[in-house]
């Protein structure tokens, strides 16, 4: 075990050892429904003092409804809580070393929309809604470290370090009052850390948001309803993070957020800077049927710097609507050095490759929402973006023995991309239980790319290349969808979107090329909720993944002495269809059966041409994957949270091009376990352990070996929870990415290393104006009391 993992696990042992508690008596019984059926997963807890309502011991009922709970002696109040049932309270006398048998404890089904549910040792009030649920957070806000910590204490929301998710959903949208946070998923945690939990009065978790926000049925929306204090609010956070890993790997970053809200005007500014440096290695061996071989070894090191930020300004002109501006400006710079070694029949070559890339980007969006009536709402959004990339590459080759040639080249690439997008969406309520959503999205981009290359081979002759291309890219996505809710617990959605893409490429040295393709993408959702807490959903979603510009870039360039990379102008979008049946029980247990179908799957394919290896991205295969994903989430104790997931799938891949295996089958499986701890009563000292394992995977292109990942961390909050420290170990048992692939005429085996054990430390301070006057008022009150 390396030093990082040993140090962190030692801290865990010291922390957990102080949590033991001596117990003197026991209570047993069986939780049943009014009909006498056993109730599984009911939360049973003991309270000694009703004034503080402190829970001193707790447990869960088994699948047959039975439970056994140890407790200190004395007169106790026992509570029984379960989603879908009314809370039960009874007085129990606990005697030393004796077992009290309560027999059958019946629970009455909850017919009201408002329920009390115990989550992580605290009762919370949950109100059911047709498209999700709402939680009153007033009682638990004061003991939460931030808005992120608060959300982690709510039903069906999981917070794993800096990752937040909703059970059964793949994506999350966050809204603060009516201001949508237009940030990447990785930035959501930083946004939530900047808000004091006491600002939040309630949280809505919308599991079926409008189609505008959820085109494929896999998105949940979280809405934070802020208190009146937020109407005159200035605050934010500032933080720094440091990472140091084995070899040449690390990171340093600073970031901050500033929020100003004045009734109708909301302003959010978030600048950040980070410097990353890394080391990795790639090794590949090509074994030919003739007995020859070609091996490459490429260790590399380099830096990746980013500076930029985003800002949002939104104004609510009346109760019916608002408009806003969101802008994102940043620049990323790469400086990398690759030292490669090539071994082939009869020779060996050493190369050194320097790459410098600058990537400035600007993106701005203007948006508006207006409710024309209680039943008709419209959205409009227009975006502009500008992206540039200047790439300078110097490749130096040396040789051994002398009779084998080598090469040296200097390459420059200038890429410019500009584009606009436009979206117009409407939602119309038709009657009491039906709504109609429709709209379209349009996208246009102009990309120009100029590349020059000066190559000298073996020191004897030189060649030069120079070309410039212009690419026009157009995409249209009209859609229509209808939603029907015959009852509060039953929900249907049926829709279709059309994805049309068109490319037009012009070049100085090539003929003009045009390409277009259309995909019809249906979606269907049927969801039923029972009052007992069960949910069953049938889902069909579909989409189209368009190729990236790097994949269709027509230039051919040399990677090293015998390796080339080439774009594919004929590459089309990859369409995918997912069929799922999802069963969940009380937000804790979830079982998903799925079928993933992919057509014209985009895959990087290596081909051998006259002893040289060409890498080209192609629509290489169609695939079908069948699988099941069970998961369990346990959050009934104050000090412990467990999230366990597993998946197994059987994948069939069939090649639609020559040069790769015609058919391949594979078992795809893996699991991950996350455990979160709270080490003290105030919840200011927390930690986690996370472990993930991915089994062997095989496709028509390659087979990869199993991989393991393990991480752990601790967090401490001080100064009234405003100052936070985090210490984590990342990739403590990171595996190599290795495997092999079969081709016509040769076999390729690879063994790459991208991740190394890394120690992560961060500090974050949250500030606001909520208590500016409070200390002065408290001081005046104490002075008056002393005089009296």
Image (cartoon, grey):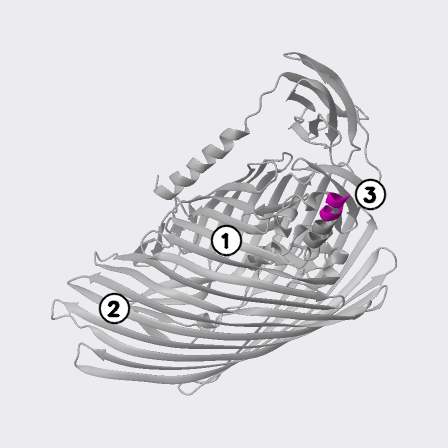
Q: Residue at x 70, y 30 (%)?
A: 42
- Decide which of tag 1 and tag 3 comes sooner along the chain: 3
Q: Secondary structure at mark 1?
A: strand
Q: Secondary structure at mark 3?
A: loop
- Decide which of tag 2 and tag 1 comes sooner along the chain: 2
How many residues crowd around disc 1 within 10 Å: few (fewer than 14), some, or many (20 or more)? Answer: some
Q: Position of residue 736 (x, y in %)?
A: 36, 49
Q: Secondary structure at mark 2?
A: strand
Q: CA distance from mark 2 to mark 1?
A: 39 Å
Q: Position of residue 551 (x, y in %)?
A: 45, 70
* Residue holding disc 1: 763
Left or right placement of residue 372 versus residue 577 in this view: right
Q: Residue at x 12, y 67 (%)?
A: 401
| Rendered image quadrant of residue 285 | bottom left
Q: Does 724 appear above or below 590?
A: below
For the N terminus, give its image quadrant: top left
Q: CA distance from mark 1 to mark 3?
A: 42 Å
Q: Residue at x 48, y 70 (%)?
A: 571
Q: Which mark is residue 113?
A: 3
| Rendered image quadrant of residue 745 | bottom left
């Amino acid at each position: 075990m390396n030093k990082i993992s040993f140090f962190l696990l030692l801290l865990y042992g010291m922390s957990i050892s102080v949590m033991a508690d001596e117990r003197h008596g026991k209570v047993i019984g069986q939780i049943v429904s009014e009909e006498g059926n056993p109730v599984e997963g009911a939360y049973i807890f003991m309270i000694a003092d009703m004034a503080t309502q402190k829970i001193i011991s707790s447990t869960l009922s088994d699948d047959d409804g039975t439970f056994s709970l140890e407790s200190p002696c004395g007169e106790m109040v026992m509570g029984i809580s379960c989603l879908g049932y009314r809370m039960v309270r009874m007085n129990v006398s606990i005697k030393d070393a004796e077992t009290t048998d309560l027999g059958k404890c019946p629970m009455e089904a909850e017919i009201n929309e408002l329920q009390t549910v115990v989550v992580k040792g605290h009762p919370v009030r949950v109100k059911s809604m047709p498209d999700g649920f709402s939680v009153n957070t007033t009682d638990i806000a004061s003991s939460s470290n931030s808005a992120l910590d608060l959300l982690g204490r709510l039903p069906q929301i999981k917070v794993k370090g800096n990752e937040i998710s909703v059970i059964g959903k793949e994506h999350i949208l966050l809204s603060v009052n009516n201001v949508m946070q237009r940030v990447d998923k990785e930035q959501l945690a930083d946004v939530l850390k900047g808000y004091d939990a006491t600002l939040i009065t309630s949280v809505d978790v919308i599991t079926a948001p409008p189609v505008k926000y959820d085109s494929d049925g896999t998105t949940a929306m979280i809405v934070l309803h802020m208190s009146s204090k937020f109407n005159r609010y200035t605050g934010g956070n500032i933080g720094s993070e440091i990472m140091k890993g084995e070899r040449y790997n690390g990171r340093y970053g600073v970031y901050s957020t500033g929020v100003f809200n004045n009734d109708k005007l909301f302003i959010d500014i978030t600048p950040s800077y980070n410097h990353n440096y890394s080391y990795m290695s790639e090794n590949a061996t090509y074994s030919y049927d003739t007995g020859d071989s070609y091996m490459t070894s490429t260790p590399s090191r380099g830096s990746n710097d980013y500076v930029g930020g985003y800002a949002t300004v939104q104004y609510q002109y009346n109760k019916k609507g608002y408009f806003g501006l969101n802008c994102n400006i940043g620049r990323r710079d790469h400086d990398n050095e690759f030292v490669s070694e090539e071994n082939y029949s009869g020779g060996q070559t050493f190369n050194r490759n320097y790459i410098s890339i600058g990537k400035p980007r600007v993106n701005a969006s203007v948006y508006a929402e207006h409710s024309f009536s209680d039943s008709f709402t419209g959205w409009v959004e227009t975006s502009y973006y500008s992206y540039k990339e200047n790439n300078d590459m110097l490749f130096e080759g040396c040789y051994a023995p002398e009779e084998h040639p080598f090469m040296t080249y200097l390459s420059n690439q200038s890429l410019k991309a500009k584009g606009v997008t436009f979206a117009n969406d409407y939602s119309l309520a038709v009657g009491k239980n039906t709504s109609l959503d429709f709209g379209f999205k349009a996208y246009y981009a102009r990309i120009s790319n100029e590349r020059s290359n000066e190559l000298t081979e073996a020191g004897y002759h030189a060649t030069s290349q120079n070309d410039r291309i212009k690419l026009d890219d157009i995409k249209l996505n009209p859609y229509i969808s209808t939603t029907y809710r015959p009852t509060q617990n039953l929900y249907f959605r049926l829709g279709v979107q059309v994805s049309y893409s068109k490319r037009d490429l012009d070049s100085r040295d090539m003929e003009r090329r045009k390409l277009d393709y259309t995909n019809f993408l249906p979606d269907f959702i049927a969801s039923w909720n029972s009052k007992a807490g069960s949910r069953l959903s049938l889902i069909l979603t579909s989409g189209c993944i368009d190729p990236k510009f790097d994949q269709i870039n027509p230039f051919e360039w040399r990677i090293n002495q015998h390796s080339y990379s080439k774009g594919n102008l004929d590459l089309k979008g990859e369409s995918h269809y997912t069929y799922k049946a999802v069963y969940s029980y009380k937000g804790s247990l979830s079982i998903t059966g799925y079928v993933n179908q992919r057509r014209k799957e985009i895959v990087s394919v290596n081909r051998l041409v006259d002893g040289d290896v060409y890498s080209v991205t192609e629509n290489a295969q169609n695939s079908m994957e069948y699988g099941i994903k069970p998961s369990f989430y346990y959050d009934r104790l104050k000090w412990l949270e467990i999230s366990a997931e597993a998946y197994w799938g059987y994948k069939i891949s069939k090649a639609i091009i020559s040069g790769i295996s015609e058919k391949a089958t594979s078992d795809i499986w893996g699991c991950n376990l996350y455990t979160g701890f709270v080490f003290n009563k105030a919840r200011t000292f927390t930690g986690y352990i996370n472990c993930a394992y991915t089994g062997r995977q095989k496709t028509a292109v390659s087979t990869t070996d199993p991989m393991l990942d393990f991480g752990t961390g601790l967090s401490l909050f001080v100064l009234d929870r405003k100052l936070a420290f985090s210490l984590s170990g990342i990739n403590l048992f990171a595996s190599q990415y290795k495997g092999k692939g079969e081709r016509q005429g040769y076999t390729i085996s690879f063994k790459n290393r991208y991740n190394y054990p890394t120690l992560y430390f961060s500090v974050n301070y949250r500030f606001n104006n909520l208590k500016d006057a409070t200390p002065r008022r408290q001081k005046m009150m104490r002075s008056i009391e002393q005089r009296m």
